[in-house]
């Protein structure tokens, strides 16, 4: 019998399907992947082509090398096709007194994750992943200084179904002058839980997952990786710091290293076990103003894109998950 | 400059992109569509193959023909791979006192829209669309009689990107024992607006759209089709009854005919103008208990799937719409 499960952090229901349940093997069919070269002449993100991008915001690069030249190992640039732009104000406009809008002010950046055209988080070495996680933090904190911005979404798209067109490995950050409604709802639920119980709902969730164990994928000193009880898509995995922390911006260098280890192992397993699936990962973090809250807790949500989002999901936002979280966790635990 | 726009009915923001703006011609590239036969021997939805499906719930069929035989023109069956099943109760279960779940009770039905394997709403004749809209209503009202159910999502998936695998034209209904959170948020916003203004926010929206005209696609005596001010995807189109009505279940036979006319014209235009794009449409309607509310208003949301949903959208639910609603509406208005 199928099950309706509720995400305790959002109160959102998901269907854990049984009639259409799939085993991990059913997904391992992504066979039209192309082998990429380590360098591509026309790729704007490849070393030597720095002039093809807007001037860099930040790069970790060899001493003595100039900005916008070779010598970097991670490089952040403004997105040339930015969804939001840095110049603009916060005033609201009102078309015919009813429809509200504002200038599309914000900042849209690209993190070029490696000089290698064919690298990806699922195969990169640990050191490189550490550097990516640190540059996320640096840009997040820099963007938080702009008083117009309230929130930063950090995300990675991998593969066509996940919305990427450029192969060269990259992530993105988008700073917005509003807190997305989706995040506000999450915060409200977390605050309500804190009101009722005097503890962070995510901290409680960590305790419970550690207690029941069956959805845990990997536990280290500082982080827990698990398939959440009410995960909305097959093999969705969350990585969460075990110690309470509302914002990603406060992660220490040492913890970023420890996070890299967990992220690397999970991504390697997804890459090999599910044959390099398309996926997105997103860092869910508190809005700047809630950075010190006792109720919210940052985490990375990894969402392989193995099923299409169809009309039921669009219309109700209730997802039908065809792989029970316990089955997914068991699979991911193996050989990790 | 890009614009951030807010949907007045949900308070959700969307980005109307300019840097990456696309014209309608940019999307007309869906050239790998296959020509389908009007009959397919192995298709469980084709006439003559009725035994391949579970027994029908309802069919509009020629007088004197037996259930589960040929002679129908629209036929409703339980989904063989149902996400939710009819037997089960409403009790909540609590894994380790924290994680809440319930039996996956509900009803998942398939509306086989035509005996013709290769028909689709974008090319069907008017009469057939009327019958589909009426059978939606009949099943909606029947499902509303089950005291365990609170809501029905009616939706259609067209094409692989929209989540369908079976070609034979069909829609689906899913009755759920819960009101999806997404719908509850919509209701709450609508109630708040009603509190403040003493009118339905959707009725007001209709007035405003008629007033500014630039996003109107088609107006008839009873219905308005328009591209909403804050549409989240290119060419998203809403069809809304001009007279206040919270639930689809109360639509009259006469109004269903008039709706069919509008739906047909919009779908034809999408089919020809955007080269048969993959799409979903969903009927947004009030939960059963709010069927007579003054604040909510049913509508059909048509969402062509021209862009992929990427990490930013998954993480923030803020969509980046690459075609301004006014441009989309102008395109759809032509030749309609």
Image (tube, coloured by chain):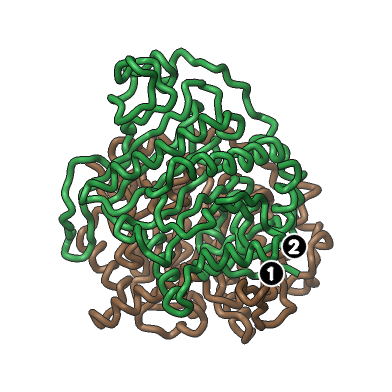
Chain colours: A brown, B green
State whether discs 1 and 2 lie on one chain: yes
**Residue at the image position 31 percent from the left and 37 percent from the top:** B82
Q: In which quarter of the image is residue A141?
A: bottom right
Residue B300 at x, y percent in the picture: 51, 50
What residue is drawn where x is 55% and y is 17%? Answer: B38
Question: Is mark 1 in CB contact (under 8 Å) with mark 2?
Answer: yes
Classify mark 2: helix, strand or loop.
loop
Q: In the image, residue B118 lies at what x, y percent? A: 55, 23
Q: Which of B121 and A239 is in front in this view?
A: B121
Quarter-wise, where is residue B120 in the image?
A: top right
| First of labels 1, 2 by sequence position | 1
Quadrant position of the N terminus of chain B in the picture: bottom right
- Alpha carbon separation for disc pair 1 and 2: 8 Å
> Going by the image, does B147 lie left or right of A19?
left
Whether residue A187 is visible, yes or no, is yes
Please rate how many residues cluster around mark 1, counting C-alpha atoms within 10 Å: few if below 14, some from 14 to 19, many from 20. many
Image vertical order of residue B16 relative to residue A305, above or below: below
* Residue bearing mark 1: B3
- Picture coordinates of residue B8, whole percent (x, y): 54, 69
The residue marked by circle 1 belongs to what chain?
B
Mark 2 falls within which chain?
Answer: B
Q: Which residue is drawn at 55% across and 59% down?
A: B313
Which residue corresponds to the image point at 29% horizontal and 44% vertical from the top-left? B143
Q: Which mark identifies residue A127?
A: none
Residue situated in front as seen by the camera: B258 or B21: B258
The residue labelled by disc 2 is B18
Looking at the rendered structure, the secondary structure element under dot 1 is strand
């Amino acid at each position: 019998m199928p099950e309706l499960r509720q995400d305790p952090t959002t109160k959102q229901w998901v269907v854990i399907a049984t009639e259409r349940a799939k085993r991990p093997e059913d997904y391992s069919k992504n066979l039209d992947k192309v082998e990429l070269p380590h360098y591509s002449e026309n790729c704007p993100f490849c070393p030597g082509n720095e002039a093809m991008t807007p001037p860099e915001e930040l790069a970790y690069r060899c001493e003595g090398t100039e900005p916008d030249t070779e010598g970097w190992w991670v490089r952040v640039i403004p997105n040339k096709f930015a969804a939001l732009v840095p110049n603009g104000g916060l005033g609201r406009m009102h078309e015919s007194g009813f429809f509200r809008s504002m200038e599309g002010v914000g900042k849209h950046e690209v993190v070029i994750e490696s000089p290698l055209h064919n690298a990806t988080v699922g195969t990169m070495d640990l050191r490189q992943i550490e550097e990516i996680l640190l540059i996320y933090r640096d840009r997040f904190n820099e963007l938080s200084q702009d008083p117009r911005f309230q929130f930063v979404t950090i995300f990675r798209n991998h593969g066509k179904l996940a919305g990427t067109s450029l192969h060269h490995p990259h992530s993105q950050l988008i700073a917005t002058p509003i807190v997305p409604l989706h995040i506000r709802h999450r915060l409200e639920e977390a605050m309500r839980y804190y009101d009722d119980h005097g503890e962070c709902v995510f901290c409680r969730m960590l305790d419970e997952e550690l207690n029941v164990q069956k959805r845990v994928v990997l536990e280290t000193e500082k982080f827990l990786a698990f398939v959440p009880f009410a995960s909305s898509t097959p093999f969705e995995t969350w990585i969460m710091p075990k110690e309470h922390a509302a914002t990603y911006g406060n992660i220490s260098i040492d913890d970023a290293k420890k996070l890299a280890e967990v992220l690397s192992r999970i991504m390697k397993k997804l890459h090999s076990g599910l044959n390099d699936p398309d996926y997105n990962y997103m860092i869910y973090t508190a809005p700047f103003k809630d950075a010190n809250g006792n109720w919210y807790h940052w985490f990375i949500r990894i969402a392989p894109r193995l099923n299409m989002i169809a009309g039921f999901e669009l219309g109700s936002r209730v997802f039908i998950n065809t792989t029970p979280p316990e089955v997914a966790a068991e699979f991911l635990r193996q050989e990790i």
